[in-house]
Image (spheres, rainbow, N blue to C red):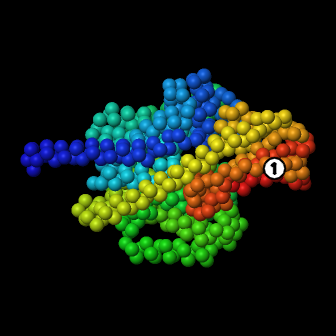
Amino acid sequence: MTIKENLETSGVKRSSSVRSQVLLTLATLFCLLPFSGKAFHIDDPLFLWSAKQITKHPLDPYGFQLIWYRTWMPMAEVTKNPPLACYYAAVIGAVAGWSERALHLGFLLPALAAVLGTYHLARRFTQSPLVAAAATLLTPGILVSATSVMCDTMMLAFWMWAVAFWLEGLESGKQGRLLVSGLLIAAAALTKYFGICLVPLLFVYSLLRQRRLGIWALYFAVPILVLGGYQAWTNALYGHGMFSDALSYGPQRLAEARFAVLLYPLVCASFVGGCALSAITLAPAVWPRKYLVGALLLASVAFGLGWIVLGRHLHATHTGTVLQQRWWTVGPTLVLFIAGGVSVLALAGKDFWEHRDADSLLLAVWVLGTFVFTAFLNWTINARSVLPLIPAAGIILARRLDALGITSVKPLQVKTAIALFVSGFVSLWIAQADAGLANSAKQAAMLISERTRNEVGAVWFQGHWGFQYYMQQLGVQPFDFNTTLNRGDLVIIPPGDYTIHAPPAQFVVYDDLLEMPLRQPVMTMRAAMEAGFYGSFFGALPFSFGTVTPESYHVLHMGAKLQPQQWLRPGREQGAAVEP
């Protein structure tokens, strides 16, 4: 090839890259801008309260108390995340205000950086980086997570660019890029502790690629020293290191579950399949039809006969109960999602087996490592923990399509485009349903505050997440279970929160029910539908389809004095969590 031809080819590639990145930017904005007014949801309040604390005390992000688990506790004992996302939110809040729109628009930047970082990294692994980035963006895991102001999407952005800079620095020998990568790894770890997993991941990759230790290994000291400094700083501030505290929190789930530990890989596979939905919609393009039919039939028979999901123990689990009650909606979805998760793991294994090089090992360990962490080490299986796996799955899918000739086979290109469209459409639908759930909590808080404004007795509420944020913003106090309730007091009980405990029925004279209808026939958080996007303690599916009943809020009027020691006295009838 002549110099002129090389220059022309290079120019075409640069032009194509620019067009692809512009297209991805527009697609990301198209998907996320409609949710910029979404109410704060799930753990958003924890990040917002810390951000507001930072604006007053910049070096003491967790130096306040709150009720999150029934009684007043120091924030340093409640949160299990580092504060970098809170500092980012503090800057946005100080400059643009604390409205939902201002914060969500500010958090669009990390989401965009994550998508473009996926494209930039994918160019090293595949001839179809646009497909890899689109397969990442157009998933429920990415779109729903990116509509929050939590730390997950921001950590993913640091993660993607850290990997990209490390691989470029290692290949070119440019020490500056390795240093930038080390700083980005540190930023990822200070955004969410899982970011420090990049150190062993990239170390193994580098050792296999370089075949020996080199000066590159010294740059891993940057994130390790930064995280060590953070551990020492928080230990001096709060009496315990925040990083070590978070490490000790997750494995408690293994000790508490016993036989259910066998269920975790299946639940994690369900979350991987549902959150990385493009892996399911692209399955007909990347797998032979006989494999797909055989896998689905085997999984269906196994579920129907109770061979999996703990066999005889299934009926003792919440999942087993819901499967019995709603088999025709929950059962097929669970089978499909688990098959999708297994497909992602199988594609990662197949890619490594076919290439057997450092690149394929990096992708395989990236996927498998995230899976193992989510299934066994995190405090719960949820979409937020699966999130780092999704870009790797997108890149592996693109590599598989490369092997099948997507660059030249027109029918395959059409099939891929349709699959990505379907994944994106369903993902936007799920994001809309999650936004509707979040907005309903804000609307309920406003209506309840208006209804109870002129009450003579004290007004308390239980529950947390977005409902707590808006109730406190409206001046209603969270209930401390050490508080005495008097006759005439009101206690508001929201739906869907595992910390809720209604007063004993004999102390309640009136229940004023408020129902908030939800428009979408899909849920991201409801135990009765086995949907647990933010925590698998609600269900083995990240989201579930079916008839959605309204969110029920109970305004309980106390008819007698209730002492704290009477609240949970052994032998007395106790209130129970309101079924979501």
Q: How many labels does the image show?
A: 1
Residue in view at x 14 percent, y 45 percent = 8
Which corner quadrant holds the C terminus? bottom right
Quadrant hosting residue 271:
bottom right
**Location of residue 304 with respect to 164 vertically, above or below:** below
Note whether residue 59 is visible.
no
Dot 1, how many residues are within 10 Å of its Cα: few (below 14), some (14-19), or many (20+)?
some
Q: Is mark 1 on a helix, strand or loop?
A: strand
One can see residue 524 in this view? yes
Classify residue 545 as left or right of residue 210. right
- Relative height, residue 298 to residue 514 (above, below): below
Q: Where residue 553 sits: x, y (%)?
A: 72, 49
User: Whole-percent x and y of residue 230?
Assistant: 55, 31
Picture residue at 30% right of the left edge, 54% below the top? 128
Q: Tell me which corner region of the image, top left, top right, bottom left or bottom right, holds residue 323.
A: bottom right
Query: Which residue is located at x 32 percent, y 51 percent?
Result: 130
Percent x, y of residue 476:
73, 35
Residue depicted at 45% across the width and 54% down the height: 139
Q: In this view, does 413 lie to the left or right of 540?
A: left
- The picture places residue 402, in percent across and down from the top left corner, at 29, 60
- Between 442 and 69, which is closer to the camera in this rendering? 442
123 or 232, which lies in front? 123
The foreground one among 569 and 458 is 458
The residue where tag 1 is placed is: 511
- Label 1 is placed on what type of residue? Asp
- In the picture, measured across the screen, residue 323 lies left or right of residue 448, that is left
